[in-house]
Amino acid sequence: MTAAPSIDRAPTVDLKLEVVVIPVSDVDRAKRFYGGLGWRLDADFAVGDGFRVVQFTPPGSPSSIHFGKGITSAAPGTASGAFLVVSDIEAARAELIDRGAEVSEISHREGPGQPPISGRDPQRRSYRSYATFSDPDGNGWLLQEVTERLPGRVDAGATTFTSAADLAGALRRTEAAHGAFEKELGHRDEDWPTWYAAYMFQEQTGQPQSR
């Protein structure tokens, strides 16, 4: 009998999600759509008439998408539920609409499995606010606003900001929190860079915020 693997054993090899394949019926139409959204075109190459792969990467994303000919047997338009995490869902929605996507109204949920409520979460809590859009084939995407990660969701030794916009959003939130801290303090915080660094690190790794 083979022993069951230990769930406590730490992985020794990184498994990084690199690419998600989406099925499309018209490669050139899909290429125009995703290029129009401002996603980075990484590759477009073909081998004969039966194989073609196009790769795009969303702004600030470590993962990419593939579509083309001869790369999936899935029916066009059957991909759904892929999450695009954003730090400001209203700004992300407005930009996507400006670039030609038909994006739903924003809604939020009080908790997992709860019915959607119209509008962005009033308290701007992470993981609560959503909007959706689809590509021309009907492959569905879901925008989710995340500004503070739940504990354990980020490797504390590898915190990064994937874009200038992501970093700017974190700085704005930190500035607001630090302003409240200085009001409590009653004077200017001379060591504000240390406070900023600790706050941004704790926010991204999901650790409790300290004062």
Image (tube, grey):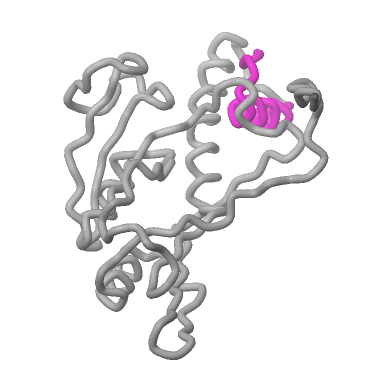
Is residue 209 rendered to the left or right of residue 41?
Answer: right
Q: Tell me where residue 6 appears, x and y as whole percent.
A: 78, 22
Q: Quadrant of the C terminus?
A: top right
Q: Is residue 158 above or below residue 17?
A: above
The kind of secondary structure the magenta stretch mainly shows is helix
Number of numbered markers:
0
Is residue 103 rendered to the left or right of residue 196?
Answer: left
Toward the viewer: 167 or 162? 162
Residue interval drawn in magenta: 191-211
Q: Residue at image x 48%, y 50%?
A: 165
Q: Residue at image x 63%, y 14%?
A: 208
Q: Tell me where residue 167 appears, x and y as whole percent.
A: 55, 45
Q: Quadrant of the N terminus?
A: top right
Q: Is residue 165 above or below residue 170?
A: below
Q: Verify whether residue 209 appears in magenta.
A: yes
Tell me the quarter of the picture where residue 203 sits.
Answer: top right
Toward the viewer: 67 or 119? 67
Is residue 96 rendered to the left or right of residue 18?
Answer: left
Q: Verify whether residue 115 appears in magenta.
A: no
